[in-house]
Amino acid sequence: MRRSTNKPIRNSQVFVLCVLGCAVAIGPTFAIAADPDIPQTQAGMRRVSVKDAIQYGAAYLAGRGRPQDLAQAAYWYERAANAGDPLAQNEIGYFYQVGIGVPKDLQRAVQWYQRAADGGFLRARVNLGIAYIWGIGVRQDAQLGYKFIHDAAEKDSGLADAYLGEMYYFGLGVPVDHDAARNWYAKGAHLNDSLAEFRLAAMLMEGNPPKQDLSKAAKLLRQSIRGGYVAAGHSLGLLLVNHPELASQPGEAVSLLQQASDAGVWKSSAILGALYRDGKNASRDHAKAYFYFLAAELQGGEKAHAAVKSDLAILSHELTSDETDRLSDQAHEWIKQHPLTLQFKNKDTGKSDEFPVFAISAANDDTHVGKLIPVPQNTAEP
């Protein structure tokens, strides 16, 4: 496969860091001070094993068995990282990249990714590659970034396969090559990477390869959903609305769209509004339709307002003013419980030595990475 050495990187393209060891690789090794940057606490002065330090970090991050304390979480992860644990090094790198419990420091984040990658942690190698592609904490060098990610892919990293697919699909530092993108997505999907599964499904629905394969696309989207990729739920819900014969059980389309709506996908909220408005895949219900159109408007801003304003105006004549006021109050209360658009959701396994990612919000700044947050609790429907 050919690589371009002068292809400009366009920040408008969709290419984000996906964490749980997010993803930024081979270059000079950076020296890092032996002591954590964060102030030590009395509890932190105890002699503990690396495994225990990671357990403490996970517990403080999740608020599991003790109050949530991001500074303490960062302290314990960095303590384990300084002891040489690659997983902890990768995670504290993410903390510094985003500013979780420590001041945001992109250069230090890359240093930790480098150490984790040197220790053989493949996700950190992918993280380093993405850092070079975007110039996050390092000079921008798409060719070097490609090398880092490709090296991880050669060691069977499904995450690396997915990002190589993204590079070829969007032409990020390499020529646009949809055949190459599809091949990388397929390789990542074979390794159960949720992003690769989602992107391969999208290509199958587009007819790329030339013939659509909606049944295979639905299977891949279900796998991506199980892996926590939020957009897969919206896509599968919409696919089942248009092709109900692919549903695995009654009501699956509405259920998937409700989950995506709860995760901040305004288009899912708008589709739910249309389904309740028309009585398609759900009983006709003007109140629910009005609620979901309002939710979409609150979630999606100007674009969503333009899409739903006519429906809201029409439905307002079908409901009393008391009903519209009540539904407006419910929608505003609901949005407080679902304030962010999520990119990824993952169940906390309860295993104390795992990095307890609850959810990752969609990227909204020039770091191309979202923040870790607790999964919002669903509220009752109107």
Image: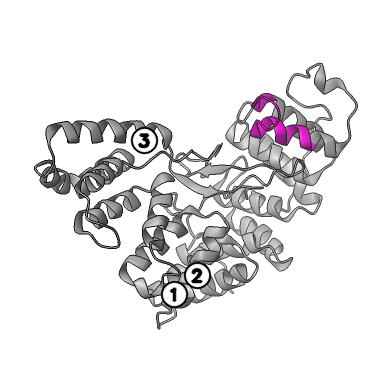
Q: Is residue 17 above or below residue 275?
A: above
Which is in the foreground here, disc 3 or disc 2?
3
Q: Is residue 36 left or right of residue 209?
A: right
Q: Read off the magenta span.
A: 54-71
Residue visible at 71% across and 36% down in the picture: 58
The kind of secondary structure element at disc 2 is helix
* Outermost residue toward the right in this view: 47
Amino acid on which disc 3 is placed: Trp
Q: What residue did someone put label 1 on?
A: 204
Instruction: Report the disc number at residue 200.
Output: 2
Q: Is residue 357 left or right of residue 289?
A: right
Magenta span main SS: helix
Does the magenta segment cover residue 66?
yes
The kind of secondary structure element at disc 3 is helix
Residue visible at 46% across and 59% down in the picture: 232
Q: Dividing the picture into quarters, in which one does residue 240 lie?
A: bottom left
In the image, residue 311 lies at what x, y percent? 16, 48
Q: Is residue 5 visible?
A: no
Q: What residue did someone put label 3 on?
A: 334
Residue visible at 38% across and 48% down in the picture: 261
In the image, residue 54 lies at what x, y percent? 78, 37
Q: Earlier in the sequence, mark 1 or mark 3?
A: 1
Q: Looking at this view, is 134 or 263 the one in front?
A: 263
Q: Looking at this view, is 73 or 158 the one in front?
A: 73
